[in-house]
Amino acid sequence: MSRVLIVGAGLTGSLCTALLRKQITAPVYLALWEKAGDTGGRMATTNSPYNPQCIADLGAQYITCTPHYAKEHQNFYEELLAHGILKPLTAPIEGMKGKEGSCNFVAPHGVSSIIKYYLKKSGTEVFLNQCVTHINLKDSKWEVSTDTGTAELFDLVILTMPAPEILRLQGDIVNLISEHQKQKLASVSYSFRYSLGLFYEAGVKINVPWAGQYITNNPCIRFISIDNKKRNIESSKFGPSLVVQTSVPFGLEHMEHSEEDIQKLIIQQLETILPGLPQPIATKFQKWTYSQIPVACAEMKNPIQEARRMVQR
């Protein structure tokens, strides 16, 4: 049985596992290593420490489907809608801009449920807190090592981490990636920002006419979401959750500041937009070193086609 490793538990990594399982007819063992303590990547969902039903999306807030992607990826959207992983976004988002004919979806159980759905569907064995540092070629196989010193052999390795993390890998892979490929990876740029999730007691009401709002006149905050309202979920069993995402300029200006200082600044600015908010019972801070991608990587080979060819040859 061939052994395949996918590195990175974001949308790309999880979807790779599902596509590999579907398209490779030969027996194959799929493993996924993720450096963080949970799956999701930039589609991360967190929950209140007092009630796991009270959740908040700290990364991607909703899924926008353009007319082009509606046609190209129709099967994916239909599958996720049929299984209740996605549903149409009907709550008002003030300041939202999009291409004509686009539609938007939310994830009722948090946006990370998309990743968990694909991983479960593929039957992939997931290992968390596994930070890959070295990849070497050993006896016609790939020896993949982590920062804890553990190493395993695989027939095929698919890297789905951010481009700078790929370029920092050590071992034989340094010489196996061509200069042309390195230039492509180095050309990728990412925006930098912070997110803060705030959880409130049951019974608290946040009385605004919107579920999300893009902010254009604040030095710190770019987007606010009343996360449960975004999903049209109201419950007497748990309180609302609110997510604040900073602007890119604020993130860059305060890149070296402490979490405590950043959180204090965000809450101060939030008070100017939503005065009179009660004290949250819990908060969750997230630093997004690799947020959105202003400049993407030029097209490379299709990893799924390459994997199918190599495993089945």
Image (cartoon, rainbow, N blue to C red):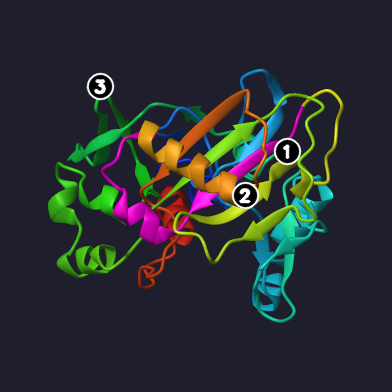
Q: Secondary structure at mark 3?
A: loop
**Residue 201 at x, y = what percent?**
73, 24
- Inspect the image, locate mark 1, and give the three-letter code of the amino acid beneath it: His
Within 10 Å of disc 1 (Cα), the crowding (few <14, some 14-19, many 20+) is: some
Left or right relative to 295: residue 136: left
Q: Which residues are magenta?
A: 239-259
* Residue 64, image quadrant: bottom right
Q: Residue at x 15, y 51 (%)?
A: 174
Which three-letter amino acid code belongs to the residue tagged 3?
Answer: Thr
> What's the distance in space between the residues labelled 3 and 2, CA to CA?
33 Å
Judging from the image, what secondary structure is the residue with disc 2 in?
helix
- Judge whether residue 237 is colored magenta: no
Residue denoted by label 2:
22
Judged from this view, the residue extending furthest toward the top is 50
Q: Which residue is disc 1 drawn over?
A: 109
First-in-chain label (1 vs 3): 1
Q: Secondary structure at mark 1?
A: loop
Mark 3 crowd level (few <14, some 14–19, many ≥20, 10 Å Cα): few
Give the percent coordinates (x, y) of residue 228: 75, 41
Q: Identify the amino acid type marked 2.
A: Lys
Distance between mark 2 and mark 1 Cα atoms: 25 Å
Q: In this rendering, which labeled residue sits more in front, label 3 or label 2?
A: 3
Comparing marks 1 and 3, which lies closer to the viewer? 1
Using the rendered view, name the quadrant where residue 212 is placed.
bottom right
Residue 196 percent coordinates (x, y)? 52, 40
Q: Position of residue 221 (x, y in %)?
A: 51, 54
Residue annotated with mark 3: 148
- Which one is nearer the viewer's eye here, 266 or 53? 266
Asked if residue 38 can be seen in this view, the reply is yes
Residue 172 placement, left or right of 158: left
**Residue at screen point 83% across, 50% down:** 82
**Residue that sits furthest to the bottom in the current view:** 100
